[in-house]
Amino acid sequence: MGSYVPNTLEERQEMLKEIGYSSIEDLFAHIPDEVKIKGGLNIPEGKSELEVRREMENIASKNQVFKTIFRGAGAYRHFIPSIVNSVISKENLLTAYTPYQAEISQGILQSIFEYQTMICDLTGMDVSNACVYDGAEAAAEGVAMCQERKRKKAFVSTAILPDALATIHTYCHGNGMEIVEIPEKDGVTDLDYLKENIDEQTACVYIQHPNYYGNLEDAQAIGEIAHGAGAKYIMGVNPISLGIIKTPAEYGADVAVGDGQPLGLPLGFGGPYLGFMAATEGMMRKLPGRIVGQTEDHNGKTGYVLTLQAREQHIRREKASSNICSNQALCALAVGVYMSAMGSEGIKEAALQSASKAHYLAAELDKIGFKVENKREFFHEFVTVSEKCPCEALKALEEHGILGGYPLGNHRVLWCCTEMNTKEEMDEVIRILKEV
Amino acid sequence: MLVFEKSRAGRGMSMLPACDVEIKKPGEKDARQKELHLPQMSENDLSRHYTELAKKSHGVNDGFYPLGSCTMKYNPKINEDMAALPGFTQIHPLQPEHSVQGCLEVLKKSEEYLCEITGMDGMTFQPAAGAHGEFTGLMLIKAYHESRGDEKRTKIIVPDSAHGTNPASATMAGYKVVSIASAPDGGVDLEALKAACGEDTAGLMLTNPNTVGLFDKNILKITEIVHECGGLCYYDGANLNAVMGTVRPGDMGFDVIHLNLHKTFSTPHGGGGPGSGPVGCKSILLQFLPSYRVVEKEGALAMEKAEHSIGEMKEFYGNFLVVVKALTYLMTLGKEGIPEASQNAVLNANYMMNKLKDLYTMAYDEVCMHEFVMSLEDLKKKAGVSAMDIAKGLLDNGIHPPTMYFPLIVHEALMVEPTETESKEVLDHAIEVFRKLYNDALENPESLLQAPVTTPVTRMDEVEAARHPVLKYEFES
Amino acid sequence: MEIREGLLYAKSHEWVKEEGDVVTIGLTDYAQSELGDLVFVNLPEEGDSVSVGEAFGDVESVKAVSDVYSPVSGVVCEINEELLDAPESINGAPYDAWFIKVKEVSEKEELLSPSEYEAFVASEQ
């Protein structure tokens, strides 16, 4: 049993004596008896480090680590350079608190400033915050920040990550905004529906690009419709895709959000991931969460500091637009390292290879009866539909250590490729599926 | 220098092999036109850049970090190793259930440990941080009242000593915040509470011990008053490190709680996150929990959604790898370690408080729990030295300052939380430094007004940073 | 500390200038010195109604937010947009840095004369 309490029993007694107590229980004497636990906690006894390691490793071994993965749907297996883990393991960064004391936190503050810069560069937007919990929550906060007194309606595409749609609903149930779900048509957001129903009470329009099925949306047209009605345009984007796909800024977005997990964060059974939020200059003060700014110290030296704090909960309290306090800071650091290690060329390459391999796999799958459903251009995800249920096929892949696409029901499967998938692996998939 | 200023065109790292299939580019109308300016650097230059940044940072691993309300306890290394196991990091959240029995076991075991420690009947690990947990808990309370057709409950009661996230979360959940003044002894003013409770009360948000580090002895009465008017009681678990193993929120009358795994359960703060804010609740709220809970079905573990779930608070199941770290810690401490940790947190805080109270004014002169609050108001009047100045003076002595100016009910507040993972000699040294600074304030106040002077930068011009925000580096092209 | 003649004062430290039907409102020198360096101002929109004793906007310093209260009920007919770009003018010239002009004034709270306000501020300190 370890409790990480350095002081020995003797040392504790000494301390107690010095301050006039005879036992530790004395310090809890004022707590009413009725609320105190009797008989101790009903949990296992503490273990030595060796035992804990054995037990946790045993638990981990009950998970199947696939040798290759063709599944995305919100969590993507990309290459993570070794330098990422090397940096986020540095203890001064790992074990530090939020950088409220700027003078001893310049390292962390600068890394956030660099991250903000890189997110703006990737998305083309003017300002970025220091991150929020993940892409779904960023979408919900993005919708909330577009609220105005006379505009409380949000038009949200249904061709987005289901968890993002659900999260937007949960948040709006709290803040009172009305959600109008835009149906999908031919695998993308129904433009006509949006055109016909958008009105003067609309605060914003939210789409995902590429969308849940991998399709590229009519992003330009949707933005024009939104602005035409005086509403804001929010795009949920895949950060790797921005290596080769037009930026939200170029499509006219007011707010760009998404999940930064593809940028150097492991799959980790769903978390911790990272929500990035970027916006136009005009929306700067509506962004939730921490933001780092550049300034000078009293000797004129350039430095970094948390700024625009009057937006946040610790100052505005019940008038704050968001309650967010802790975010995913270390993940933002990982993302910054990833973007610096990959560089512009690396991100472009990762994007290009992901798209190229997806198109190769799609063409090959189509030949053997897994018909590609996508009628639009797609990035690195696509949907196949087959005559038979794909369950047998997916099981066969599993037995070979391959995690196939994500079954969507109705014989449909959502496949994903990244730069990690090789031609050999994809050919093996085809071979296995042919046999089934 | 920023990483962008160290970038040189043409440099870079060789990360990926050539593409082994035909290249497919996007069509013209969707192709990116804007240039990308991400850094182009060799690995050694990049690595040195981050070593430089790390040197200008200060973590618990660097020294004493008595940040009140943050529980900056030591972050055990085994936690990091376990969270880095490929059997956890390489698992896709949408793998079939039979292939993630280990992950499900992590969630189930963590729920069992933490429900026992807190006296709750079930728990969700989806919330990513404490504030996220608060919002989740309030949405559970909302769902509860809505399910009973109780539309009148529009208000949440919050003491004025509460952490800012409490009222902010209440607003996000669509509630009006009723702030009640604390009693002179720092606890909840029972009369004020009774007056605020009514048919429109959805619930109360409270932490015990409270934000001034004191255990509110009236806690059973408090939760009774709220329950009597039909409201529910929410426990902010940020201060659990004071009482875990001795008292359970469930036994104090709380219906729903959140925990901060990155405070009480030793997962590292990472410069501001990621944390994890699991939400536990009593059986009346189980049917509303978000995301999934792990249950046993036909001899295996499976994920089950609650019957009337409030939906999702974010993607997937929560900050899973952070939960792995907390579970590792729970296994290490176990039945005796948990109360041992909290008891020593309380001992360390009382030790420091008693050895400083002859100089510093303690906001409340009584036994404290895991943290205590000092008021520098007198010192400010006497010598013109504020809480901020003492804090900056500590920076020059290698000690991270306590929490400043919180809670709001104490003027010129400094909140000190040593935690249990500090040895007697670390505490003795810190006490010495605090005492020295107090005397410096009296004898040479100017030195503190200039502090810090030994850090990489001195006090920052925050006014300019807010008036004319510069929030990113501007590239030339 | 300056207390300008020709103006009336509210106990919540706003100054009021009445010119015919229109009332101009700003923050006093005492208020700005208590608040410290101001970094941002949140103003209502033209056409918004204001109510006596209720906040119509707020001012932000680095570490705090403070409500600005309306001493009258009426309709906002003009807002001082310059304040949005230069909140420091409230610190530098509080009696020139007006926040809003209000018309259709229906209610007014009890306002203090310059000398009454001076006495009031002295009693607060």
Image (cartoon, coloured by chain):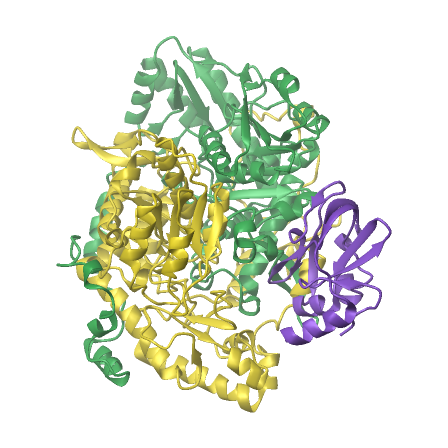
Task: Identify the residue at the far left of this view.
Answer: A39
Q: How many marks?
A: 0
Q: Nearer the viewer, residue A412 or A87?
A: A412
Task: Identify the residue at the far top of this view.
Answer: A387
Which residue is drawn at the image coordinates 25% and 73% (left, top)?
A27
Note whether A53 is above or below B214 in the view shown: above
Task: Identify the residue at the far bottom of this view.
Answer: B443
> What x and y, as percent, mark residue C42?
69, 51
The reply, left or right, for residue A220 in relation to residue B347 is right
Which residue is drawn at the image coordinates 39% and 62% (left, top)?
B189
Chain B shade: yellow
The reply, left or right, for residue A178 in relation to residue A416 is right
Q: Nearer the viewer, residue C87 or C112?
A: C112
> What x and y, as percent, mark residue B361?
44, 80
The reply, left or right, for residue B247 in relation to residue B269 is left
Chain C shade: purple
Image quarter of residue C83: bottom right
* Residue B180 in view in this figure: yes
State the green chain: A
> What x and y, as percent, mark residue C96?
83, 61
Image quarter of residue B18: top right
Is the C terminus of chain A in the top left, top right, bottom left or bottom right quadrant? top left
Is the N terminus of chain A in the top left, top right, bottom left or bottom right quadrant? bottom left
Which residue is drawn at the image coordinates 25% and 40% (left, top)?
B283
Note whether A229 is above or below A185 in the view shown: below
> What x and y, as percent, mark residue A233?
65, 32
* Residue B84 in view in this figure: no
The reply, left or right, for residue B106 in relation to residue A342 is left
